Structure formats: C-alpha cells, structure tokens
Amino acid sequence: MEYRLQAPFDPEELKKLRAGDTVSISGVIYVARDAAHKRMHETLGRGEALPVDVNGQTIYYMGPSPAREGRVIGSAGPTTASRMDKYTPELLDLGLKGMIGKGKRSQAVKDAMVRNGAVYFAAIGGAGALLSKAITASEVVAYEDLGTEALRKLTVEDFPAIVVIDATGDDLYQKTALS
C-alpha cells in the first residue's frame, strides 16, 4: 500500500502501516545522528529536559552536506540506524513515534517500538541529492557545535520512505534479502 503521512504522525495512522508499505511524508521531522543522540542521553541522565520534546515526533538519522546556493540543504541521505540503537529505546519510551534511516535495528529497539506503537522507515541510501529536494526548510535547534551532527528541525514535503518495521514489530528485512 502507499500512504501519505503528515508529521508529526497520528498514532492511529501508524497502526495501519505494514512492513513493505511505501509512504510520502510531509510536515516537521527532526534530524539527529550519533553525537546528538549521545548528548540527548547525557541530558536525560542528568534529569534535564531535552532541547525538543520528542513525544509524537520523528527523527531522521542523517547528516546533511552543505547547501549549494539557492538550496535549503545539501545532500540528505540516511545514516545507518543501528548506530543509534543504544539510545533509541529511551527516546521511544519518551514518545518518539517514527525513525527514518537505513539498515537493521536491534531487538531492543524493535521491542520498544512495539511497546510504544512506533514505526521505522527506510530512506534510500545513495539518493541524498534526490531526498534533499523534499526538504523545504532546515533549522539547527540544538547542539550547533556538532556541525553536521547538530539537532535540526526539517520541514519536508512528499519525502519518500518505506516502512521497514511496523508498530507490530513486523520486519521487512527479516522477510526479504533487502538487508
């Protein structure tokens, strides 16, 4: 099936998605990679609030290249998601509803996804220039000192992705040889 989704996502809409469905995402999503995830984990460990409320939100694992003249952002291809796996269950338990990246996820992440009704989407690796065309705004919201790994807020329009792990835990990578 093909779905058009508005981010932040309606939890009821996420329940309808199945591994293998294609989606077109519009709205606001956040970008965070390894260093930003580590910093968020440390912030929570100190009992402090995160710089953004992740409840109901989606994080895209990506580090953009510099924007060319006249563009909002440079190449915006996905990063391997498993690098964030040690931090992800904590964010899912805070209400994170979507993640976009590439590659497999750990069992701990899958369990937290099922527990929290979240979905993992894959973006096409190697298509960063194409994906950047779906990004209409980009703003650093925290951790500016991390450069390309800063926490960013993106506005996207018709961002293409595939449901890899749905809210029931069904994993497309386990069904196919795509991994």
Image: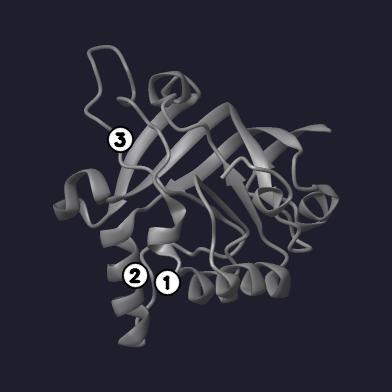
Q: Badge 2 is on which residue?
A: 40
Residue at 53% from the left image edge and 74% from the top image edge:
89
Q: Nearer the viewer, mark 2 or mark 3?
A: 3
Q: Nearer the viewer, residue 173 or 19?
A: 173
Give the x, y percent position of residue 77: 40, 33
Looking at the image, residue 178 lies above or below residue 71: below
- Label 2, residues with CA under 10 Å away: few <14, some 14-19, many ≥20: many
Q: Nearer the viewer, residue 52 or 39?
A: 39
Amino acid carrying label 3: it is Pro
Amino acid carrying label 1: it is Tyr
Q: Secondary structure at mark 2?
A: helix
Q: Badge 3 is on which residue?
A: 64
Give the x, y percent position of residue 17: 80, 47
Residue at 34% from the left image edge and 86% from the top image edge:
45
Looking at the image, residue 132 lies above or below residue 3: above
Q: Badge 1 is on which residue?
A: 87
